[in-house]
Structure formats: structure tokens, C-alpha cells
Image (tube, helix red, strand yellow):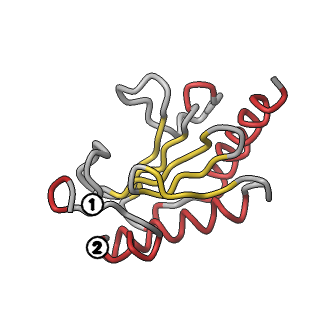
Amino acid sequence: MRENGFPKIQNLAHLYEYLPENQRIIVEVLRQFILENLPDDCREKISYNVPFFYGTKGICILWPSAVPRGGIQEGVLLGFWYGNRLSDPENYLTKGSNKQIFYKIFHSAEDIETEPLLKILTEAIRIDRMWKAN
């Protein structure tokens, strides 16, 4: 066991064992959406005990509040690793105190709006592709 009795997570099934049902559902809906819209050469791994999606570098991360050190008290955070580079004209993302990672917190699966989320994810992928070109 690690911090606050929370173990080192080995895989997604292991993570789901520790999540309250509401957070598990939100993570699964967001995860499926992300996987369906990521290019084939992008990958998912468990990093920092949570699902992390990357291409050339980090694209986004899902952080349920039940996992320690995420900085949120409720819901599931969808953070974009280079959120500070996203245009986000509708201010869909919260800037918070982190200068790089911008995020959206979801409190239920019904909060997930796919249209603005797809715009942000598409731009995050485009930015990730720019790292590959350099």
C-alpha cells in the first residue's frame, strides 16, 4: 500500500477496483471517447496511478478524485498536458494554478459534452504531432 492506503496501480482493472462507481463510469466514458478519437499510433498507459494518453509526448490524463495527489476533491479531471498551448476560445478548460496543464472536471457522465471535447482533443493531438516534426 502507498499514500493514504492507495496501492500502486498496475492496470485499468486494478484502478477500477478502487474507484467509486460514479468515478469509474466517468473514467470509462471519457477513456472510450479518447481512445476512439486518438490516432492509431497513440497509446494509453497507467502513469501516476491513472490513465495517461500519449503520442510523441503527453496528450491528456484522466485523474479520478479517489486517486491521491490529483488536487481535486470530487469528480474526474481530464487534463491536457499542453493545455497552455490550446486556443480554447470557448473557455471550455479551467486554467487553474498549473501553468501548463489545463483541465475540465466532470461530476457525472451526463456532464460530458462530446462536441467541445472533440475540438480540444483534436487540437491537443495536432500539437502533439508538432513535437514529432521537430
Residue at image point 36% right, 68% down: 23
Discs 2, 1 touching: Cβ within 8 Å: yes
Residue at image point 75% right, 29% down: 131
Residue at image point 19% right, 53% down: 3
Residue at image point 56% right, 32% down: 83
Residue located beneath label 1 in the image:
66
Q: Amino acid at mark 1?
A: Ala
Q: Is residue 28 left or right of residue 70?
A: right
Residue 58 in the image: state x and y as whole percent.
Answer: 60, 40
Q: Of residues 52 and 63, which is closer to you in this image?
A: 52
Distance from Cα at disc 2 to Cα at disc 1: 8 Å
Height in image: 90 above or below 77?
Answer: above
Q: Is residue 81 left or right of residue 21?
A: right
Residue 33 in the image: state x and y as whole percent.
Answer: 63, 64
> Going from the N terminus, do you reach mark 2 or mark 1 first?
2
Where on the picture, by quarter, is residue 44? bottom right
Residue 115 in the image: state x and y as whole percent.
Answer: 67, 55
Which residue, as the protein is rendered here, is positioned at the far right?
Answer: 133
Residue located beneath label 2 in the image:
20
